[in-house]
Amino acid sequence: MNALLDTRGRPLRDLRISVTDRCNLRCTYCMPADVFGPGYPFLPRAEVLTFEEIERLARVFAGLGVRKLRLTGGEPTLRRDLPALVARLAATPGIEDIALTTNGLLLPGMAVALRRAGLRRVTISLDSLDDATFRRMNGLDVPLAAVLKGIEAARDAGFEQIKLNTVVQRGVNEASVAAMAERWRGTGITVRFIEFMDVGNTNGWRLDQVVPAREIRDVVHARWPIEPVDPAFPGEVAKRWRYRDGQGEIGLISSVTSTFCGDCNRARLSPRGELFTCLFAGSGHDLRGPLRAGAADADLQALVRRIWGARDDRYSELRAAGQAGHPKAEMSYLGG
Ligand code: SAM
Ligand code: SF4
Ligand code: SF4
């Protein structure tokens, strides 16, 4: 079978599956509480893919070259039997790697079951080590200690890899950069600093709130000298830097100031079963309709082939060139 390439020659390797549009936080840069309030029309249960449906689609994607899955949301751990999904996906032929992105709050009750189900890697989002800043940023006044407990639970469960995601916003949590680097150096946990992105339409994004990755690098480098590390695989999103004193690594995700559309091999599946070919796409391609209408695996594969074959997304490059500006799907819907 020929490799499946899009119009820019990019293969399909990585599938991010958003298993729910709901969340137990209201991070101001993602699901601002005034927009995602009590009346917000979250998807009714029947609209959301079942685990059987997700497993089926994962098999279809694996048949087209996908090797890595990342479960995300909304908050994926709100699907109570998430470990059962992990077990199904881990048994899918062709899938070599499954990771989870979570805010960590529910990990104390789930980490061991996830690990036993075959999950090897977890990314936990943590934007600040200052309790007041963290409470403000998560929109619901949830204490920092709750996430730290989640990180501890992940460590105790013995995951092979734990990473932390820190979104850096000018004037909000810049002080987090040095504090996070200092706290997690030498622990085996890698912090990935992410430039604040213009995802969705509701987070009031402004370019002057982006702290450029090079500035983050300089802050860390001034205290603890770092040097670049080669990417672990093609299309790796985070630029890796290691501490010269051997105390581990950090990652920098420069989606705004230094774009990486050129080797973007990521597809995204929404909770409703739409295939999005870019994080910043306005809409997706319905896979759930054909799936529920009884399409065979081969039909679904042909459909995904057509969609990927026609893909020409490069939103971040266009933004950098000043040419972007269409309505986009929400981050909490697609999951990053
Ligand atoms: N709820 C889970 C969590 O927070 O880890 C998974 C979903 S969340 C949408 C995935 C990642 O996207 C998180 O690490 C979050 O910090 C990041 N994110 C959300 N909004 C963002 C934005 N505007 N810019 C950059 N990263 C963002
Ligand atoms: Fe929820 Fe994650 Fe978005 Fe925060 S970043 S609101 S935890 S989905
Ligand atoms: Fe991929 Fe779209 Fe992000 Fe570019 S903007 S790296 S195409 S998801």
Image (cartoon, rainbow, N blue to C red):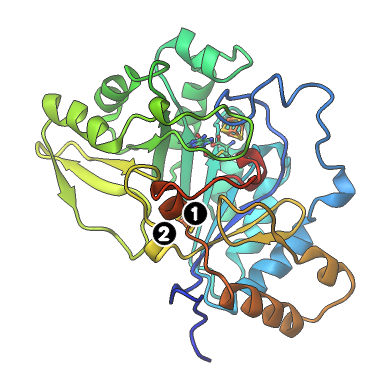
Q: Kindly identify which numbered label has been placed on residue 315.
A: 1
Q: Work out which quarter of the rendered image holds the C terminus and state it.
A: top right
Q: Is residue 300 left or right of residue 320?
A: right
Whole-angstrom CA distance, mark 1 to mark 2, is: 8 Å
- Assess disc 2: are there few (<14), some (14-19) or many (≥20) residues with their C-alpha within 10 Å of its C-alpha: many
Q: Do the residues under discs 1 and 2 have CB atoms within 8 angstroms?
A: yes
Q: Is mark 2 within 8 Å of ligand 3?
A: yes
Amino acid type of the residue tagged 2 in the rendering: Cys
Q: Nearer the viewer, residue 278 or 228?
A: 278
Element class at badge 2: helix
Tell me what residue is drawn at x 50 percent, y 90 percent. 2
Looking at the image, is mark 1 or mark 2 nearer the viewer? Answer: 1
Front residue of 235/285: it is 285
The answer to whether residue 42 is left or right of residue 265 is right
Nearest the viewer among 157 and 283 is 283
Return the residue nearer the eye: 242 or 238. 238
**Residue tagged by mark 2?**
261
**Cβ(mark 1) to ligand 3 < 8 Å?**
yes
Label located before the other in sequence (1 or 2):
2
- What amino acid does circle 1 point to? Tyr
Q: Residue visible at 50% across and 31% down?
A: 153
> Considering only vertical position in the picture, is 69 above or below 103?
below
292 left or right of 64 in image: right
Which quadrant would residue 76 be assigned to in this image? Answer: top right
